[in-house]
Amino acid sequence: MSQRRVVVTGLGVTTPIGGTVATSWSALLAGTSGVRTLQEEWASTIPVNIAARVLVDPSEVMERVEMRRLDRSEQFALIAAREAWADAGSPDVDLERLGVVVASGIGGVTTLLEQYDILKEKGARFVSPHTVPMLMPNGPAANVGLELKARAGVHTPVSACASGAEAIGYAMEMIRKNRADVIVTGGVEAAVHALPMAAFAAMKALSTRLDDPAGASRPYDSDRDGFVLGEGGGILVLEELEHATARGAKIYAEICGQGLTSDGYHIAAPNPDGSGVRQAIAFALQDAGLTTRDIVHLNAHATSTPAGDVAEANALRLALGSDADHVAVSATKSMTGHLLGGAGAIESVFIVKALQDRLAPPTINIHNLDPAVTIDVVRDKPRALPSGDIAALNDSFGFGGHNVVLAFRSY
Amino acid sequence: MALTQEAVLAGIKEIVEEVAGIPAASIEMNKNFTNDLDVDSLSMVEVVVAAEERFGVKIPDDQVSELATVGDAVNFIVKASA
């Protein structure tokens, strides 16, 4: 029996550049930065006070009572999932065959820290009874699962900044293995808070270009100095091909492969030889039945850190060989900042849009391309992708040495 | 000084509206928290803590399960404030 094929039939996001897929995608093509100086009082107490908050706050689209029982990460998940589910046509599906796989890198960290403040200031009796369901990292997945009444399984893979991509790969496998026909999947993150930001700053991981927020995230630029923390999330509805065609669903693209490896090298630093990334790409191509010649676009992990961007670019060159010359590489974190566990998810949404519109989004803020970067980076303006059958990859890597590569192709 | 039933009911209405999103106008003495107002066990904890703070009374945990209706809670608080 041939393998069950998996297609994308719904998309939803809330990002620093838009509250919906349509607005985020057009802002992305226009090269819009979502990075701002934080206005919160605490922001002046930490070394880095720039971040990419969502453009549309959940309070603008969600009822107050619902919000107070949900961590911000869970709010993002529900907002994106509602858009994606409606985009898929709000299908009437067998709930026993409906699953949810939504990841977060850190979970409800703001809830945890705010409730700890309440514990210290007012006492244990004032700690919210909603604290545990709000802080648990599976909370975003659980809330989406509850809303849709999914019964085929609700899961949350955690692999730091690779979490969102790992979730989508896991979802694809659930459908392939016949555990479900439809999966709502993606990743979210809501970690713009003094402690996570101070902690990332302590690692010297964040850009300190505080006087130029919109220019701070500059993947592949010679003067890049770290990532900018972003928040938000992305959700895709994945569906078994025949299930989708039988109900006349709009099909955006096919998700056709994943490659997973681990570096075994360092808890936070990328392996400079890029071997883990190279192997993950090879596995993803093999799983997808694609060759390097089929790949025309790649949404890179490229977070704007000095070490990471070059290690990834070298790995891409090694993995794709001379075929890297016809791969349009986009580093969309230059505009959205780094959404950690949400990154692989919004970037997968962007890849699906790129395949649909045949347009690779730009990478902004490259004034001087790092000469060590020998891949073909799409700079400043979108670039047209070829007609015919085309395929694209998403790279996502996480602290801990997690490497996840997803493969998509036009349908 | 003992609180009046009217004052406590008005306060409970505000608290339940804030915690559970139930319009104050639909909250009456005979309404059951769970069945009529959709206040689940977690939200009930919030109602109790908010009521304690607002009315300056103590509602022991072993009493909370006895407070099935809004009237039960109002009467308990009026009595406790006396």
Image (cartoon, coloured by chain):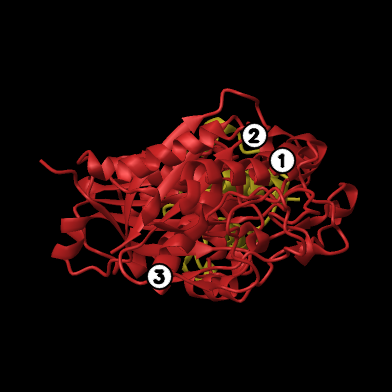
Q: In the rendered structure, which disc, 1 or 2, sits on the residue that comes first in sequence? A: 2
Residue A54, compared with residue B54, is above or below; it is: below
Quadrant position of the C terminus of chain A in the picture: bottom left
Residue B71, compared with residue B66, is above or below; it is: below
Q: Please give the letter of the chain rendered in red.
A: A
SS under mark 2: loop
Q: Position of residue A335 (x, y in %)?
A: 65, 64
Q: Disc 2 designates what residue?
A: A270
Q: Chain of mark 3?
A: A
Q: Residue at x 77, y 61 (%)?
A: A368
Q: In the rendered structure, which disc, 1 or 3, sits on the residue that comes first in sequence? A: 1
Label 2 near label 1: C-beta < 8 Å?
A: yes
Q: Disc 1 designates what residue?
A: A307
Say whether mark 2 and mark 3 are on the same chain.
yes
Q: Disc 3 designates what residue?
A: A386
Q: In the rendered structure, which disc, 3 or 2, sits on the residue that comes first in sequence? A: 2
- Rounded to the nearest angstrom, the CA distance separating label 1 from label 2 is 7 Å
* Callout 1 amino acid: Ala
- Rounded to the nearest angstrom, the CA distance separating label 1 from label 3 is 32 Å
